[in-house]
Amino acid sequence: HGGRMVGTGAFYQISAMLAALPTLGGSWIISINLFYRSIGARFLGERNLRGFKILTAITTTACVVLSTLAVLTTMPFHLPLSEDLTSQACNLAFSKGCLSTYNSVYGGGRHDGSAGFEETFKLFGLILFTLALFRVAKSGLYACFDFRFLGVLGAAIFVFVSVPAFLFALFVKKNIEGFLLAMYLPMGVAGVLFTVQLVMHIRAMTAGRRGPWDKAPRPAEVE
């Protein structure tokens, strides 16, 4: 029973969700944060702390607005969008041996207990906001050269969040929602903690204290 719940249908839904993210707003969030990371590091290298704070505020606002617009423009159409994203799975209905997989993608019949993708797709907004929070905060810490914190916290989250979440999905929840939780809960926890650290750095900059951002090379040094 557990083997069927982690079978083809569940992973097909995960693949469809991953395909939706970049096409429905995720690629914009990634692009904005690549810009933020590089320009933010330059501002800190120039000791332009005011510019870095303004850039952080603009980047955060842009990601929130884009995520909100993506959710508002996709959720009213979640049914046709989910059908389009899983259209290739319709071919499974023509094979008797694949009917169980078809049911696990679309729901209905004696399937594995997971929701159909049209229900799973309703989690798209939460996942996109989680991605945005994580990307903004991580890019800010990259610009601050706080690699030690990123590494230590990443290892801790893997041990204390990722592994327990995966085991919960595999042996307790045993469906698509459980695996999405295992995938994005660590990212959400990291996003919150990265944000707290970034806010503390900005406050320290404002107070004139030193920190890892002082390691940022000045433009003259790079040249």
Image (tube, rainbow, N blue to C red):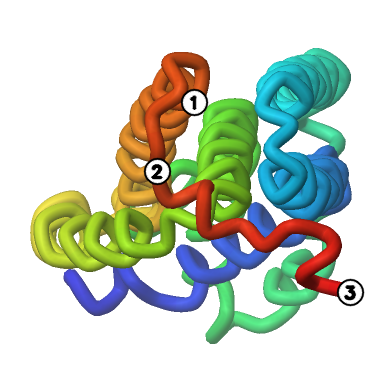
- Given the image, on which type of amino acid does mark 2 rest? Gly
State whether residue 177 appears in this view.
Answer: no
Q: Nearer the viewer, residue 26 or 140?
A: 140
Mark 2 Cα-neighbour bin, 10 Å: few <14, some 14–19, many ≥20? few
**Dot 1, how many residues are within 10 Å of its Cα: few (below 14), some (14-19), or many (20+)?**
some
Classed neighbour count for the residue bearing mark 3: other residues with Cα under 10 Å, few (<14), some (14–19), many (≥20): few
* Residue indicated by mark 1: 205
Is 64 positioned to the left or the right of 155 in the image?
right
SS for tag 2?
A: loop
- What residue is pinned by disc 3? 223
Q: Are marks 3 and 1 in contact (CB under 8 Å)?
A: no
Labelled pair 1, 2 in contact (Cβ < 8 Å): yes
Kindly indicate the quadrant of the structure image that contains residue 16.
Answer: bottom right
In the image, residue 188 above or below residue 88: above
Horizontally, residue 122 falls left or right of residue 7, namely right
**What's the CA distance linking mark 3 and mark 1?**
25 Å
Q: Position of residue 34 (x, y in %)?
A: 78, 54
Q: Is residue 160 left or right of residue 134?
A: left
Looking at marks 2 and 3 on the same chain, the residue that comes earlier in the sequence is marked by: 2
